[in-house]
Amino acid sequence: AQSVTQLGSHVSVSEGALVLLRCNYSSSVPPYLFWYVQYPNQGLQLLLKYTTGATLVKGINGFEAEFKKSETSFHLTKPSAHMSDAAEYFCAVSSSVLKGAQKLVFGQGTRLTINP
Amino acid sequence: KAGVTQTPRYLIKTRGQQVTLSCSPISGHRSVSWYQQTPGQGLQFLFEYFSETQRNKGNFPGRFSGRQFSNSRSEMNVSTLELGDSALYLCASSLVMINTGELFFGEGSRLTVL
């Protein structure tokens, strides 16, 4: 079974400060890992994904994440926060071997607040 | 290219009623998944359809059902509504056949059960 743990349901940073959102996963098979963002009253938008290859993944809006197998982590970072980054962020995992079955397991989400 | 369209966006029902939610995927996408989002349980997988066949199902009671039509549009139905069914129901579509998890989500249908 797969699971995702996001450390911290709420994170608050100042505008211009580093953003770090933590995600740890559990998977018995090689995982595919994702970060999605949800703005108020909207659906989820894919920020970035790790499938295979380079472990440092760059996404949209200046975000990036690093897959660390030894730590079973996939933390999301952004060097300098913008007010527009305020949203809820979800880490998710899926199985690389379940061909033909799209299923994501999500973490509980982290609400990011940006202080002016 | 139009995104995933869900209707209705908001609806209010009473306990015991049933509801049908509709999802039109991005043109060309053949996989449609449904998720339930609540403050307490977060995002939970309901089911996934591909070429009119249910390929995967989450851990929900039989009151939750779905189907997919030949044009890839999908509907989900919840019968005998309970207060706990109040949630945001998200539909997502995907182009690829293998499981990469790159899903494109609609804005959701917010169901309130009174």
Image (cartoon, grey):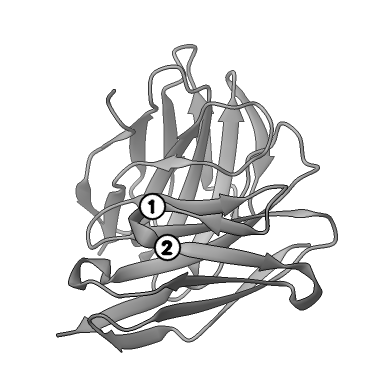
Same-chain check, marks 1 and 2:
yes
Q: Looking at the image, which residue is at 69% across and 37% down?
A: A101
Q: Please tell me whether residue B90 is drawn above or below residue A25 in the rendered image.
A: above
Instruction: Find residue B20 and report its image quarter.
Output: top left
Dots 1 and 2: beta carbons under 8 Å? yes
User: Does A104 sit left or right of A111 as displayed?
Assistant: right
Please state which amino acid type lies under the numbered disc 1: Ile
Mark 1: few, some, or many residues within 10 Å (few <14, many ≥20)?
few
Return the x and y of residue A65 as percentages of the image width and height. Answer: 55, 65
Q: Quadrant of the C terminus of chain B?
A: bottom left
Q: Residue furthest right?
A: A28
Disc 2 sits on a residue from what chain? A
Report the disc number at residue A63.
Answer: 2
Circle 2 crowding by C-alpha within 10 Å: few under 14, some 14–19, many from 20: many
Position of residue A97 measured from the top left corner of the image (x, y, whole percent): 81, 42
According to the picture, the residue beneath numbered tag 1 turns out to be A60
Q: Chain of mark 1?
A: A
Whether residue A82 appears in this view of the structure is yes
- How far across and down, in percent of the image, does residue A32 sit? 68, 52
Instruction: Give percent across and percent down for residue B16.
Output: 36, 54
Residue B16 in sight here: no
Residue at coordinates 38% horizontally, 25% vertically from top-left? B26
Taking B89 as reference, is B72 above or below it?
Answer: above
In space, the residues marked 1 and 2 are separated at their CA atoms by 6 Å
Q: Nearer the viewer, residue A87 or B41?
A: A87
A55 above or below A99?
Answer: below
Label 1 element class: helix
**Residue B85 vertical position relative to residue A101 in the rendered view, above or below:** below
**Residue A103 or residue A90, whichever sits in front:** A90
